[in-house]
Amino acid sequence: MAFLMKTMISNQVKNLGLGGGSEEKKEEGGTSDPAAAHGMTREEYEEYQKQVIEEKMERDAAFTQKKAERACLRVHLREKYRLPKGTENSLHRCPSSQEGCR
């Protein structure tokens, strides 16, 4: 949150035109720098990229955890009710010849 506030305030100060206006125009002309393209300094952009990567890693870890929990639950239910491994897919399919399958 602090990063967002800092970015917003720094952008507003830059827009006031307090010195260095010609330097910004030169930097904006060369959009090869991704930080300049996003309107951030290089340090802010690197911090932003680190945050994005950390958030992605957290989402991936949570997804992997949930996926493992679901797999464990499926195995437990198969053992409890003595179901073969392919049963879950066959329950969801409905042959086209039977209309009252739902």
Image (cartoon, rainbow, N blue to C red):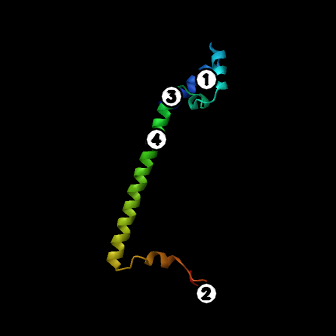
Q: Secondary structure at mark 4?
A: helix
Q: Is residue 52 left or right of residue 36?
A: left
The residue lying at 36 percent from left, 67 percent from top is: 73
Q: Secondary structure at mark 2?
A: loop
Residue position for label 1: 12
Dot 3 crowding, Cα within 10 Å, few <14, some 14–19, many 20+? some
The residue lying at 51 percent from left, 76 percent from top is: 92
Location of residue 15 with respect to 99 vertically, above or below: above
Looking at the rendered structure, which numbered label has been put on residue 41? none
Q: Is there a contact, CB below 8 Å, between mark 4 and mark 3? A: no
Looking at the rendered structure, which numbered label has been put on residue 44? 3
> What's the residue type where badge 2 is placed?
Ser
Residue position for label 2: 97
Specify which label sits upstream in the sequence, 4 or 2.
4
Quadrant of residue 50 in the image?
top left
x%, y% of residue 34? Answer: 57, 32
Specify which label sits upstream in the sequence, 4 or 3.
3
Quarter of the image containing the C terminus?
Answer: bottom right
Closest to the camera, between mark 4 and mark 2, is 4
> What's the residue type where badge 1 is placed?
Gln
